[in-house]
Image (cartoon, grey):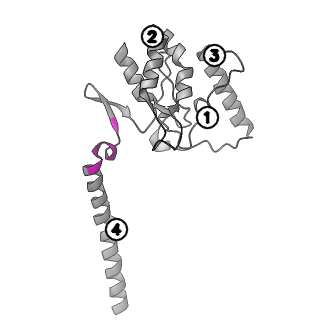
C-alpha cells in the first residue's frame, strides 16, 4: 500500500510540474521575451488581422506575388504534404500542370527554368516564403497588372528580401504576405 501511495504522489507531482507549471512558465517566458512570435506573428493592417508571417496564404490575382503551392490550401489545421513520391505519375502530372500555369501566367517561353519553390509544396504546405528567384520571376507580371514600373517592383522585392538564417543557412527569401502588403502600399 505504501508503494502505491508513493507512486500516486510521484505521478501527481510530475503531472503538476510538467503538465501545469512548466507550460505556464514557458508561455510566460515566451510572452515576455517574444510577444509577437508567441502570439502567432499576426500581421495587422488598419487594425484588422490580415494574416501571419508564419503561414502562407493564397494569392491568385495577377496583381499579387504568388506563394508556394499548398495541398491544404494553407489550412493550418490540415497541414501536411501530399506524400507523393518523386516518381509518382499523379505527382509528376501535378508539377507539370503547375509549371505550365506558371509559364502561362508570367508570359514565359515554354521550357523556361522555374524555381522549384513555385511548383513544389513545402513539407507542411504552409510555407509563407518564396525564394528571391521565385519573386523576381513574377516581377514583370505584377508590375504590368498594377501599371507600375518594373524597376520599382524589382527594388521592392530586393528591399523585402531576407538573407540566409544567421548569414549562412539557407537561401535569400521573401515573405509573400509582407511583400504583397508593401506592394499595396505603393499603389
Q: Earlier in the sequence, mark 1 or mark 2?
A: 1
- In whole angstroms, how far apart are the C-alphas of marks 1 and 2? 27 Å
Q: Earlier in the sequence, mark 1 or mark 3?
A: 3
Q: Quadrant of residue 2?
A: bottom left
Q: Earlier in the sequence, mark 3 or mark 4?
A: 4
Magenta-highlighted residues: 33-42
Say which residue label 1 marks.
Answer: 120
Residue 19: x %, y % from top left: 33, 65
**79 or 34: nearer the viewer:** 34
Please tell me whether mark 4 sits on a helix, a strand or a loop: helix
Image quarter where the C terminus lies is top left
Residue 22: x %, y % from top left: 31, 64
> How many callouts does the rendering have?
4
Left or right: where 29 falls relative to 108: left
- In whole angstroms, how far apart are the C-alphas of marks 3 and 4? 54 Å
Say which residue label 2 marks.
Answer: 146
Say which residue label 3 marks.
Answer: 104
**142 or 60: nearer the viewer:** 142
Q: Residues within 10 Å of mark 2 (few under 14, many from 20)?
A: some
Instruction: Kindly tell me whether residue 1 is visible in this rendering.
Output: no
Please tell me whether mark 1 sits on a helix, a strand or a loop: loop
Say which residue label 4 marks.
Answer: 18
Q: Above or below — where is 99 with respect to 52?
A: above
Q: Earlier in the sequence, mark 2 or mark 4?
A: 4
**4 or 129: nearer the viewer:** 129
- In whole angstroms, how far apart are the C-alphas of marks 1 and 4? 39 Å
Residue 39 is a magenta residue: yes
- In whole angstroms, how far apart are the C-alphas of marks 2 and 4? 54 Å
Q: Quadrant of residue 21?
A: bottom left
- In whole angstroms, how far apart are the C-alphas of marks 3 and 2? 18 Å
Which residue is painted at 31% across and 70% down in the image? Answer: 17
Amino acid at each position: 500500500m505504501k508503494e502505491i501511495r508513493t507512486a500516486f504522489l510521484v505521478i501527481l507531482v510530475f503531472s503538476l510540474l510538467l503538465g501545469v507549471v512548466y507550460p505556464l512558465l514557458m508561455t510566460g517566458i515566451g510572452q515576455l521575451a517574444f510577444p509577437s512570435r508567441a502570439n502567432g506573428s499576426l500581421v495587422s493592417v488598419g487594425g484588422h488581422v490580415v494574416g501571419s508571417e508564419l503561414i502562407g496564404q493564397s494569392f491568385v490575382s495577377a496583381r499579387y506575388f504568388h506563394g508556394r503551392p499548398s495541398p491544404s490550401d494553407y489550412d493550418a489545421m490540415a497541414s501536411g504534404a501530399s506524400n507523393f513520391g518523386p516518381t509518382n505519375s499523379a505527382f509528376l502530372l501535378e508539377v507539370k500542370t503547375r509549371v505550365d500555369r506558371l509559364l502561362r501566367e508570367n508570359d514565359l517561353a515554354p521550357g523556361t527554368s522555374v524555381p522549384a519553390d513555385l511548383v513544389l509544396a513545402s513539407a507542411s504546405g504552409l510555407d509563407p516564403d518564396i525564394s528571391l528567384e521565385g519573386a523576381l520571376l513574377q516581377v514583370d507580371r505584377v508590375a504590368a497588372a498594377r501599371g507600375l514600373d518594373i524597376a520599382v517592383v524589382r527594388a521592392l522585392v530586393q528591399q523585402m528580401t531576407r538573407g540566409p538564417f544567421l548569414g549562412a543557412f539557407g537561401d535569400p527569401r521573401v515573405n509573400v504576405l509582407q511583400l504583397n502588403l508593401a506592394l499595396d502600399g505603393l499603389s
